[in-house]
Image (cartoon, helix red, strand yellow):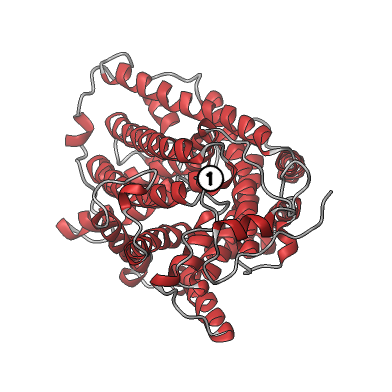
Amino acid sequence: MEKEAPTPITDDRQSHQSKDDLEADAPQLQRQLHGRHLQFIAIGGTIGTGLFLGSGTALATAGPVGCLLAFIFVGAILFSVMSSLGEMATFIPIPGCFTAYASRFVDPSLGFAMGWIYWFSWAITFGLELTAAGIIIQYWNASLSIGIFIAVFWVVFTAVNFLPVRWYGELEMWLSSIKVITVLGFIIFAICVNAGVGVQGYLGFHHWHQPGPFVEYMVEGATGKFVGFWAVLITAGFSYQGAELVGVGAGETQNPRKSVPSAIRWTYWSIFSLFVATIFFIGLLVPSDNDDLLNVSSDASASPLVIATKLAGIDVLPSIINGVLLTAVLSAANANVYSGSRILVALANERHAPSFIAWTNRHGTPYVAVGITSACGLLAFMNLSSSGSEVFNWLLNISGIAGFITWACINACHLRFMQGLRAQGIPRSSLPYIAPFQPFLAGFGLFFIVLIILTNGFTVFIDWKTANFFAAYTSLILFVVLFAGHKILYRTKPCKLSNMDLVSGRVE
């Protein structure tokens, strides 16, 4: 294996030729992914327990219409993020692009803080998915220890991510396909049940009238209905997170000028359509006051898809849905290691992490970054003890809104990116992909994402609990500490528009 560290990107703008010269002998990630791989990597990181399990709690919190509106609204915010990412990732397609864009276009301290908290969120979530896999399997045999499955799946997905990236892409594509087929199958099933196939007969929009389209949450009246809607905005945001992973793999994609725009468009519209359709039909089939919606179980019994089949009088599907849930968390675990390792590579290339982290083998696999990210999954074993599980839950809280922070930074980077293009005389018409409604779309998304970040724990102020306050805002506090600490220590300054690096990493 080669162990020569890749040449770090300098702070000053470099010529295209000098960049190539400096990196000629350095080991590099290889462009082995196709556009379809990018799409399914993002879909695999997005469609998971948030949709299959979290949607039940969302329905009970806001009601069928409130829940549907929340997912549509957050989907519009996601469109702003994906559009902004599309312009930058096709112009400068580099691995773990978020960190590099923040460092180049805004401030190195922003890239440092955003990159590390985003990496940590994926690394610790890897342990969460391993734990969830064990719990899901216990649905079939409760006597088995989840430690067995944590160990087995940790070895499997660590090994997969040490393989050439094209193999990873193929595996993720097939795992994600199962989830997509399941969602499409549920939609067809829901249409049939709603039309009267089940024991309940024709349903139509009955549950929108009884118990009602909205639910009063925590307080009564119209205010309570709005509180329920706003609480589900946060849940919807968590469910959509992962769609931005299509940009993480841009640096390993063949022909990124063509593949990345197509992947981003297909990824967004696929995820948005599947999510909205699923939420719509769940609201038609399951009343929002169904007690099973608030089941805290992590297996199929808590899924609104299973609740819908039981209400329809079909009892053979829970085990099938449980199998799909297992596939969902395993696919997400696979994506966790991949995305986390590429973010580490970006941090190393931007000199926010030791350079040896970016070392690659002859197949272009960043084995050091993969090993470090995968090692964090071993924290899942803390769940085998009660005291350890409390620590693990706090680690999860730290990563709670990292995805929202990343979305906000992507839109902020795009606004600066457009300013840099104008300052350096580069016409926007020369970009490989031109997103609609910019820069207004990025500004719209940035405003509401920041608002959601600041209010993600608003229910704490209605019913104060200190532990819940820190659970909601620990990740935001950590982000501010990382940003301020790096700026104080290195005395960084915002990037000047005239010196903004719009050359390194470009693919003509």
Residue 399 place in picture, x, y as percent: 53, 61
Residue 505 place in picture, x, y as percent: 55, 54
> Which of 390/111 is in front?
111
Q: Mark 1 falls on what kind of element?
A: helix
Residue 139 appears in the figure = no
Q: Which residue is mark 1?
A: 250
Residue 463 appears in the figure = yes
Quick check: 319 above or below 10?
above
Residue 409 place in picture, x, y as percent: 42, 63
Whether residue 109 sits left or right of residue 441 in the image: it is right
Quick check: 125 above or below 267?
below
> Which of 402/489 is in front?
489
Q: Residue at x 30, y 41 (%)?
A: 289
Whether residue 261 sits left or right of residue 232 in the image: it is right
> Which of 4/133 is in front?
4
Q: Residue at x 38, y 37 (%)?
A: 265
Task: Classify residue 56 by image quadrant.
Answer: top left
Whether residue 83 sits left or right of residue 474 in the image: it is left
> Which of 448/345 is in front?
345
Q: Residue at x 19, y 40 (%)?
A: 212
